[in-house]
Amino acid sequence: MTFDPVASGSTKKLRVAAAQINTTVGDIDGNALLIEEWISLALGQGADLVAFPELTITGYPPEDLVLYDNFITANRAALGRIAASVGEIVAVVGFVDSRNGKLYNAAAVLHRGKIVTTYRKIHLPNYGVFDERRYFSTGDACPVLTIRGIKVGVNICEDIWEPLGPSEVQRAAGADIIVNLNASPYESGKQGHRVDIVTDLSRRNRVFTLYTNQVGGQDELVFDGGSMLAGPDGELIGTAARFEEALLVADIDIVRLEKLRDRHQAYAVPQDELDSIGQPSEYALDVKVREHLPQLSGLSIHRLDRLEAVYRALMLGTRDYVRKTGFEKVAIAVSGGIDSALVTAIASDAIGPENVVGISLPSRYSSEGSLLDARELCSRLGVELWRIPIEPGHAAFEEMLSEVFEGTEPGVAEENTQSRIRGNLMMSVANKFGWLVLTTGNKSEMATGYATLYGDMAGAYAVIKDVPKTVVYELSEHRNKRGPNSPIPQAIINKPPSAELRPGQLDKDSLPPYDQLDRVIHMYIEERMAPDLIIQHEQALPEGGASEAVIRRIIRLVDINEYKRRQSPPGVKITGLAFGKDRRLPIATGWQR
């Protein structure tokens, strides 16, 4: 289906826009100014309607900020200011509504200086990272706007993820277009699922669907945008670029929709089922047809391969965490290993190499090769590298502990002392210069506790906390291929991983092979599979499957290290289930998996 520019005087076409913007939680005034700016951009493109993401004014997710009365008051005041600035365009803006002592995740319809109506979200997600039932009540009205005879239904995010929702009520009330506001966080592979949800909604209801999604990082969440328009045949017409702000603008021809409906009816839903969702309400808006609209370029469908999407998510999450917390520079302990190499590359790409300081902290066990690799990495990236040997501190700690450790065999405690010295030095440098420390632990290490509290876990943001070790290698190769340049030395990628806390130490001395480890972690953490099922799955593999003993050891390591993960900094979520808000298990528990 093609879309022609809106003809002068036509009453059967509507120009719509999705404003995919990057808001900051709690920056109500800044978000309001951003909304006004993008309303002007949409108006300049001749849009009749522009839709913003979910909870645009407050930023998403506002969490317990919504429990403060002054926060709600400020968000309502900002909505009033925005409404007063809206002229000959319809703007749909997300905000927190309050009524009779209840809070609602809501969307305001603004036109000609007024709040025309408010939609209150009906389906409230309460799983994974979502806690909406903690804060919000459910709405019961399904507004339909009439603009030049074209009917538009408005709803929010989860409302279209249910098989029956307000879209069906609005379609039964004659809606031609569904406008859906979203704050849907990124996870690897999720965009394809979103496309399926939106196109299926459009096909079964014989409507156009304009899906607006947020973009930007917020603590451990990254919002990747990917706003889209789907047609009534279930076709994907176009998408916005991902991981960047964008304005998706399109012309919708309702004449073609009417012809399609003559041939193919929408899926019929019994009235009693529609009534159980909510009641339709109609609002007519006098939006004039404007002359001489700017010509639109054709819509396209933006696609990213898996590794590029993950890499962009890590960059965006890192950039926005640094920016939104008010920092300018970061410090990274660069060891010459692959984890710190990848984090340094991501940070350099995200905020610029001039804002990254690498710190080499060699010990008596550091190999010359690792020191050279760290230097080469920073040189290729253009990152300044400092060198602070830890031997004086290491020797001092040994002397201080000699009496209480006397008569015992050296072991993990002595090894971890080195990591804790490094953590102290990193935090001291960051404290002195007002920088932010990025930690370098990956998901495989976080899962099994192969990390040191108050050592390499010390920092403000854990960039690759949700990236399995096998994916760390994939991303490192990908970064070298994507350019510019190939910053990660091949020697770093090729050498066996090691913490270098004792002579000849290798990760494989303490952990199973990473391919087995990551597979078992995925099944146990993300798939929530019971140990017996994981054992069956691994035994069914033709080769390379983990033994029962290895599987049970991995699971035990995951379980007993929950207390460590509670003390780790936030990091970018890229998988279906990350450590953090996604996974909330008791530390003290008698349940044996």
Image: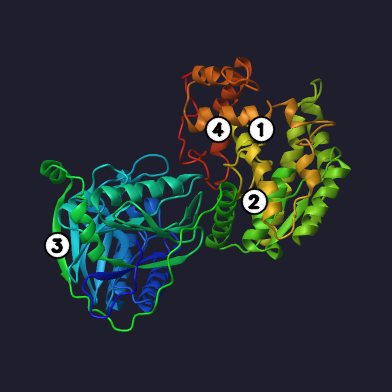
Task: Give the spatial CA distance, label 4 vs label 1.
Answer: 13 Å
Name above or below for residue 86 compared with residue 71: below
Is 304 placed left or right of 351 in the picture? left
Name above or below for residue 496 compared with residue 477: above
Give the label, 4 or 1, closer to the camera.
1
Give the label, 4 or 3, closer to the camera.
3
Can residue 431 be seen by looking at this rendering?
no
Is 317 placed left or right of 152 in the picture? right
Residue drawn at (86%, 40%) of the image: 367
Mark 1 or mark 2: whose residue is earlier in sequence: 2
Q: Which residue is mark 1?
A: 450
In contact (CB < 8 Å): disc 1 and disc 3: no
The spot of residue 92 in percent (x, y) is: 29, 65
Q: Which residue is mark 2?
A: 438
The spot of residue 268 in percent (x, y) is: 17, 45
Dot 4 amino acid type: Tyr
Task: Give the spatial CA distance, label 4 vs label 3.
Answer: 53 Å
Depth check, front residue: 479 or 222: 479
In contact (CB < 8 Å): disc 2 and disc 3: no
Mark 2 or mark 4: whose residue is earlier in sequence: 2
Q: Quadrant of the N terminus?
A: bottom left
Helix, strand or loop for disc 2: strand
The spot of residue 362 in percent (x, y) is: 82, 45
* Residue 313, label in figure: none
Give the label, 2 or 3, closer to the camera.
3
Q: Which residue is mark 3?
A: 282
